Amino acid sequence: MPIQNISTPLPHAQPMEPTDPNSLFAMAVESVNSACGVIQAPDFVKAIVSQPKNELMVHFPVMMDDGHYRLFKGYRIQHNNILGPYKGGIRYHPDVSLDDVKALSVWMTMKCAVMRLPFGGAKGGIKVDPRQLSPTELMRMTRRFTSALGGNIGPEIDIPAPDVGTNAQIMDWMMDTYLNTHQEGRQQGMLHVVTGKSVGCGGSEGREKATGQGLCYVLLELLPEFRLKPAGLRLGILGFGNVGSHTAQALAAHGAKLISVMDHTCALRNIHGLPIPELRRHVQQTGALAGFTASGLEVIDRESFYRTEVDVFIPAALERMIDEAEAKWINARVIAEGGNGPVTPAGAEVLRQRDIALLPAILCNAGGVTVSYLEWVQNKAGVHWELSRVDRELQQTIVLAARRVRLAAHQYDTDLSTAAFCVAVEHVTRAYKQRGIFP
Ligand code: GLU
């Protein structure tokens, strides 16, 4: 079929949109749809990206330490691979659901496209509270899940990585299981089937801090848009896990101060700045903020946390944390999304009315997948780069993406959040137009 005819809508290729207003997937598709409208993407692109390509759901038994068997439910959603192999994290959390994983897979496609990485988007997970499992149970569950995914993952097919509730140890087990169950893998040349591994198992320097480091680079580039400077920048951070704590640390190196922080156990504030290294140590040792003590520290309630005046508010926890009420309380100039999908559509509307700028996760937290890409490249080439090189490559890639987004905001006369989705959808559309659709 001649390429010029490809913009004709495919018969029956109407976008299938979810209708549940609280659906995270509906939220993700809506962001993509509105960008499609702004850039006037062809209908067939809108239709294709409105659903994942493959939805894999597996149930698998695992022996617990006491000898009984427990059945687990796992997902791998492969949203789109027009730009390269599917790519995205694996989440272990009791709230993992099909709808949420689908949404997160859409955002991965968009994130990789904004960053111009040669990857598509995917996401996976197991509905489980990993803190309730022993290390050996966690290992058996991870290995059994990896084997259930079988040939659906692979170094040039679909490449998992860490997400909420998973870490380098889980990635090492996934890689090891894959290599032991695939003929080609046994030649040990396929370390790049998984990223976010420990450095000793082929992981990259700088991968653990990558999301926070990337968010820091994005802010350094975009702060002038809001007449803000990193020196003395007041931060409020929701969630103090990998993303929140590394973001605080990276920005503090440029003179920013952490004014307030909250996790599922408590909220803390010090208007002169909280001690970040001590906080990180406490959370590493105890798993949460509760019980932390320091001079000048106030323990505050949830509402006071949101109402605390800061320059940049960073939600770095789970989805849908900022709804209408929280959006009314937030006292910041800018919200930079460290976690995926933290703001509900109703929350976003309030923020718009209050003229609070929203920097989207597909740009802000793309540092993680960018260093995953660098790990994949190093594994493929059989090399190991120094941290300074990884940081430099990350900075270059994410700063260029931030500039692309800023330019699109001016070009389309829209906000930075819509602009990021425009940049992503434009890139995906270009590939579809040039490649056409098989057969
Ligand atoms: N889970 C991370 C994200 O949501 C990283 C994904 C990856 O490295 O593939 O961006």
Image (cartoon, rainbow, N blue to C red):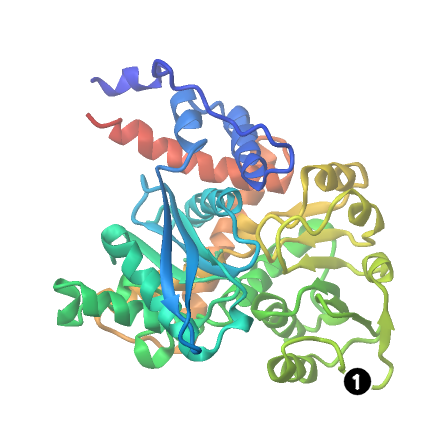
Let me know if residue 351 appears in the view. yes
How packed mark 1 is, by other alpha carbons closer than 10 Å (few <14, some 14-19, many 20 or more), is: some
Q: Amino acid at mark 1?
A: Thr
Left or right of 97 in this view: 272: right
Quarter of the image that includes the N terminus: top left
Q: Which quadrant of the view contains residue 314?
A: bottom right
Left or right of 403 in this view: 62: left
Disc 1: which residue: 293
- Quarter for ligand 1? bottom left
- Mark 1 secondary-structure assignment: loop
Q: Which quadrant of the view contains residue 318?
A: bottom right
How many callouts does the rendering have?
Answer: 1
Query: Quick one: 146 or 413, which is closer to the camera?
Result: 146
Residue at 54%, 60% (x, y): give it: 93
Residue at 83%, 74% (x, y): give it: 270
Q: Where is residue 295 drawn, in percent x and y?
A: 85, 86
Q: Where is residue 32 drawn, in percent x and y?
A: 52, 34
Query: Quick one: 199 or 96, which is closer to the camera?
Result: 96
Residue behind label 1 places its C-beta within 8 angstroms of ligand 1? no
Let me know if residue 381 appears in the view. no
Q: Where is residue 89 drawn, in percent x and y?
A: 43, 57
Quarter of the image that includes the C terminus: top left
Q: Which quadrant of the view contains residue 147?
A: bottom left
Relative to 85, is 38 above or below? above
